[in-house]
Image: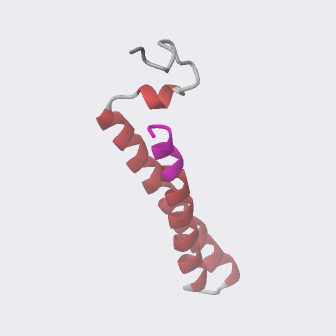
Amino acid sequence: MTDPRPADDETNSAASELPGWAAFAVMGTTAALCVALGVVAGVWVDCAWHIAPAGLLIGIVLGVAVAVVSVVQQIRRYL
């Protein structure tokens, strides 16, 4: 039996060729940055529009949602 996949598969991105620990590091860093940017944006909205803590809560929810989508996309590269 032969492997149905080509030996030199160029459809995979460079990220899918990372070792396991590096892939997890990229996923963790991506998730942390998404949530952190959501928090920063939420704090800025709270200060600019004086609607504390609504802006922070919305920023956290949006940051977590973006982080989940991003990590799911990264995981799908390996499936």
71 vs 46, nearest the viewer: 71
Residue drawn at x 44%, y 37% as measured from the top left: 78
Residue 69 rendering spot, x and y as whole percentages:
55, 56
Q: Is residue 16 above or below residue 41?
A: above
Quadrant of the drawing holding the N terminus: top left
Q: Magenta stretch: residue 75 in it?
A: yes
55 vs 50, nearest the viewer: 55
Quadrant of the drawing holding the C terminus: top left
Residue 5 rendering spot, x and y as whole percentages:
49, 20
**Residue found at the far right of this picture:** 49
Q: Is residue 44 above or below residue 51?
A: above
Q: Quadrant of residue 3?
A: top left
Query: Magenta span covers which residues?
Result: 72-79
In the figure, is residue 24 to the left or right of 70?
left
4 vs 70, nearest the viewer: 4
In the figure, is residue 47 to the left or right of 78?
right
